[in-house]
Image (cartoon, helix red, strand yellow):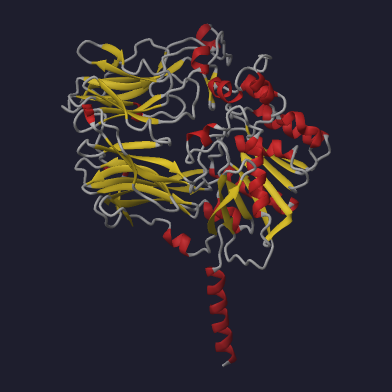
């Protein structure tokens, strides 16, 4: 009998331990990642790639599936069976579009001096010398078209000898070029600027190339900011995303439509910014995604055509989640991808009649069922200037309000990026909370989803009201009896890394530890080394040598973390990517060297081959393990 009781005890104990498993770095890097590849040629199935990290090989394994658009089971297929509907084939089926690199300029030493073919030199006489994580080598992305079935021919270049990119670098793809409905024209996106003008401007335009005449027309010449993501309705109306201000990468993003010579901005009167959009099947409406109150939701705007009636924007979905993409409309439903802070992306259908969701995939359900999930709470905190600020508070699994927990202030990057219900494989709140930390994530000044004024408030004020917002958030949540006020930390990347460096000099003993990833440490050298100069020109206000610009001088002096280093007195972990040209390596190394020479407990985590992000599985696991090791040591 005792033996039976012992066996039963072990069984119960084992099942309890299994049920109480929490997210770990190793489990996070078992999460499968859905990527929608499009619809099949018949339009009846969604084609899906599911990537699984392969830690041993330091890459990703892929499996391919098709999913009926009306719902059903995933059907495994081979990569060769994807058979996606090819949007790059012309409507008449005669031509296909593609893009490739074209050598335009001689920049490398081996190109300039043909007899020195082993030279690794680069020779520049203008700006635009590097972008994101690659150096300019004289090659440019160009779009080509050619007859279907002529795979061995080169095709016709839409921009022969032009030193400009289509698709755009660093992240553009085949969404940057489309066919007209009659197959007579090709629309494409390009920023046809060079050198210093390219580095200081966001003036990306949409061009129309006519196959018969081989002539090109700039159809957005009147707009000096971004014009991107062209898409044609079933009725032939052209829509695209537009930002008005040149050099402002986080300007309000509007949906503009051109039809029969009439141009209309459908969202200019709406106090928000558009992420992405999809024409309705009948061409009478546009569905789009946008941040709103700490989430990303589905909206609809009607297209009134030439009637010049004011368009009406309507929010369709609501809930504690992010809509990360709208795939397609099928009858009265939209097929979308959706995340929240506890779940990676899955495919859902959204019923346009009753605004309800239905999950179509659940590839990670078994994993999530095996772990205890954190609780995500939505709070509002009063800021120092009397505003109501949304703050996400993520509580550890099996949270016990009678206990005290170490707490992390999370500083979002951007600086104008939404702190919504995203699911990150690095800054993963589920993972942080599962290690026993409360996470405080404020929607501080500068974030979209709270009106254009709130979003714009951070420019030229990096160390101003936003720092009060951070401290208002952590001070408010720290009043809770379950927050251990002797164990507060601050963590963040990019602008969030800047925030950590800045807070380290002004926090007045609030925090016990800091972690900064690819953070801006010195605004002057940031201006001198970053590649997209339009960003610092707008957010800083002017170059550091412009002594007459008071706003800029404040950024380079009062709001410059390097000027407050003498007040540093708290342990800090500094993480830096070697190929980060957005926030270059000098930033992290300078901060680390300062901390070391000041005698502050500090550590440098350096990834020579990573850019602004950490993408390789083994590097990501090192990142996670060092992150939590540091917190364990110092918090």
Q: Nearer the viewer, residue 411 or 114?
A: 411
- Is residue 137 visible to us here? no
Q: Position of residue 288 (x, y in %)?
A: 35, 39
Quadrant where the image shows the N terminus:
bottom right
> In this image, 343 relative to 535: left or right?
left
Question: Which quadrant would residue 592 be assigned to in this image?
Answer: top right
Query: What residue occupies the far front of the structure in this picture?
Result: 386
> In this image, 430 relative to 603: left or right?
left
Reply above or below: 498 against 483: above
Q: Nearer the viewer, residue 130 or 226?
A: 226
Question: Which quadrant would residue 215 be assigned to in this image?
Answer: top left
Residue sitting at x 59%, y 91%: 2
> In this image, 314 relative to 632: left or right?
left
Reply above or below: 533 against 619: above
Q: Position of residue 614 (x, y in %)?
A: 56, 39
Q: Position of residue 628 (x, y in %)?
A: 66, 51
Number of callouts: 0
Reply above or below: 59 against 146: below
Query: What residue occupies the far left of the structure in this picture?
Result: 92
Q: Nearer the viewer, residue 103 or 392?
A: 392
């Amino acid at each position: 009998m005792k033996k039976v009781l012992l066996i039963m005890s072990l069984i119960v104990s084992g099942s309890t331990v299994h049920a109480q498993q929490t997210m770990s770095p190793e489990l996070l890097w078992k999460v499968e990642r859905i990527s929608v590849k499009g619809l099949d040629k018949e339009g009846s199935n969604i084609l899906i790639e599911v990537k699984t990290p392969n830690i041993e090989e330091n890459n990703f394994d892929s499996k391919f599936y098709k999913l009926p658009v009306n719902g059903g089971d995933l059907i495994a297929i081979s990569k060769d069976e994807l058979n996606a509907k090819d949007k790059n084939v012309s409507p008449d089926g005669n031509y296909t579009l593609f893009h490739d690199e074209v050598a335009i300029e001689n920049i490398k030493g081996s190109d300039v001096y043909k007899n020195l073919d082993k030279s690794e030199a680069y020779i520049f006489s203008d700006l635009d010398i590097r972008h994101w994580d690659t150096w300019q080598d004289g090659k440019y992305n160009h779009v080509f078209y050619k007859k279907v079935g002529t795979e061995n021919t080169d095709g016709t270049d839409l921009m022969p000898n032009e030193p400009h990119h289509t698709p755009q670098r660093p992240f553009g793809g085949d969404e940057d070029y489309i066919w007209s409905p009659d197959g007579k024209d090709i629309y494409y996106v390009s920023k046809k600027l060079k050198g210093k003008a390219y580095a200081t401007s966001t003036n990306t335009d949409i061009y129309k190339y006519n196959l018969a005449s081989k002539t090109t027309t700039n159809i957005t010449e009147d707009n000096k900011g971004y014009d991107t993501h062209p898409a044609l309705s079933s009725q032939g109306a052209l829509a695209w995303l537009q930002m008005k201000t040149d050099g402002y990468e986080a300007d309000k993003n509007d949906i503009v439509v051109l039809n029969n010579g009439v141009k209309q901005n459908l969202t200019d009167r709406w106090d928000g910014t558009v992420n992405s959009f999809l024409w309705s099947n009948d061409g009478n409406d546009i569905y789009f995604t946008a941040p709103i109150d700490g989430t990303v939701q589905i909206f609809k705007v009607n297209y009134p055509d030439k009637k010049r009636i004011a368009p009406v924007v309507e929010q369709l979905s609501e809930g504690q989640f992010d809509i990360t993409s709208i795939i397609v409309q099928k009858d009265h439903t939209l097929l979308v991808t959706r995340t929240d802070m506890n779940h990676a992306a899955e495919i859902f259908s959204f019923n346009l009649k009753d605004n309800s969701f239905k999950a179509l995939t659940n590839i990670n359900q078994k994993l999530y069922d095996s772990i205890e999930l954190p609780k995500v709470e939505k709070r509002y905190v009063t800021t120092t200037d009397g505003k109501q600020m949304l703050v996400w508070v993520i509580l550890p699994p099996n949270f016990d309000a009678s206990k005290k927990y170490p707490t992390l202030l999370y500083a979002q990057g951007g600086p104008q990026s939404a702190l919504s219900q995203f699911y990150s494989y690095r800054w993963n709140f589920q993972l942080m909370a599962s290690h026993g930390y409360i996470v405080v994530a404020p929607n501080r000044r500068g974030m979209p989803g709270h009106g254009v004024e709130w979003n714009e408030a951070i420019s030229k004020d990096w160390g101003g009201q936003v720092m009060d917002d951070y401290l208002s958030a952590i001070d408010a949540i720290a009043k809770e009896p379950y927050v251990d006020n002797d164990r507060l930390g601050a963590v963040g990347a990019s602008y969030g890394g800047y925030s950590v460096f800045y807070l380290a000099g002004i926090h007045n003993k609030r925090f016990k530890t800091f972690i900064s990833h690819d953070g801006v440490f010195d605004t002057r050298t940031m201006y001198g080394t970053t590649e997209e100069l339009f960003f610092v020109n707008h957010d800083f206000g002017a170059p550091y040598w412009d002594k007459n610009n008071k706003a800029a001088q404040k950024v380079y002096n009062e709001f410059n973390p390097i000027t407050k280093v003498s007040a540093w007195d708290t342990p800090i972990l500094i993480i830096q990517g070697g190929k980060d040209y957005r926030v270059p390596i000098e930033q992290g190394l300078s901060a680390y060297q300062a901390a070391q020479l000041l005698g502050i407990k500090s550590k440098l985590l350096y990834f020579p081959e990573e850019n602004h992000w950490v993408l390789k599985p083994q590097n990501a696991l090192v990142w996670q393990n060092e992150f939590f090791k540091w917190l364990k040591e110092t918090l």
